[in-house]
Amino acid sequence: MRRSVRLLAGLAATMTLAAGVPTALAPALPGMWEVGRSATGADAQRLCVGEILVLSQWEHRGGRCTRVILGDGGDKTLVHYTCADGGFGRSEVTLVTPRTLRIVTQGISRDGPFAYTLHARRVGNCAPR
């Protein structure tokens, strides 16, 4: 019985975290971000981000995915996500500075595995629409 109560309490805490901005990523602001595999910014793609956690599902960006925060402490947030098309992933997002993130991600996309590291850098605000 006690184990069930602890399990439910842990699940409730995880769901609460999933609803808000993770503490570790709170200093990172939405806006225009450049994301690429090179820390130098070479071949980076620009994306207007309204919610920082969208960067955790880079492989499935634009997909209909749900995210659950598995861990949030210090400068790291661990995110698991599943998408309506059957893909899923797990990403560790590290706050290097409030304008720089490192994203180590892996999962399944288009019936095959993926695993890589991304570097994201905030470059400004998004252009008004």
Image: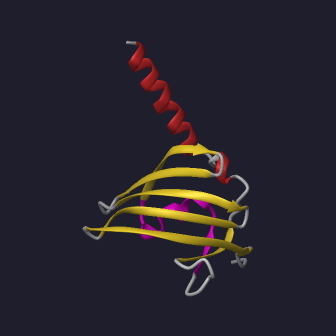
Outermost residue toward the bottom in this view: 43
Q: Residue at x 35, y 68 (%)?
A: 114
Look at the image and say whether residue 53 sits in the magenta stretch: yes
Say whether residue 83 is magenta. no
Q: Which residues are magenta?
A: 45-64
State the image coordinates of residue 87 (x, y, percent, origin top left).
33, 62
Quadrant for residue 83, please give it. Answer: bottom left
Q: Is residue 7 left or right of residue 119?
A: left
Residue 109 in picture, x, y percent from top left:
32, 68
Residue 76 is at least partly visible in this image: yes
The quadrant where residue 4 appears: top left
Q: Residue at x 58, y 44 (%)?
A: 72
Residue 33, above or below 82: below
Q: Nearer the viewer, residue 61 or 37?
A: 37
Q: Residue at x 57, y 50 (%)?
A: 77
Q: Does residue 47 lie above or below 28 as drawn?
A: below
- Residue 96 x, y percent position in the rendering: 67, 62
Residue 12, placed above or below residue 98: above
Toward the viewer: 50 or 4?
A: 4
- The answer to whether residue 62 is seen in the rendering is no
Q: Residue furthest left?
A: 111
Image quarter where the C terminus lies is bottom right
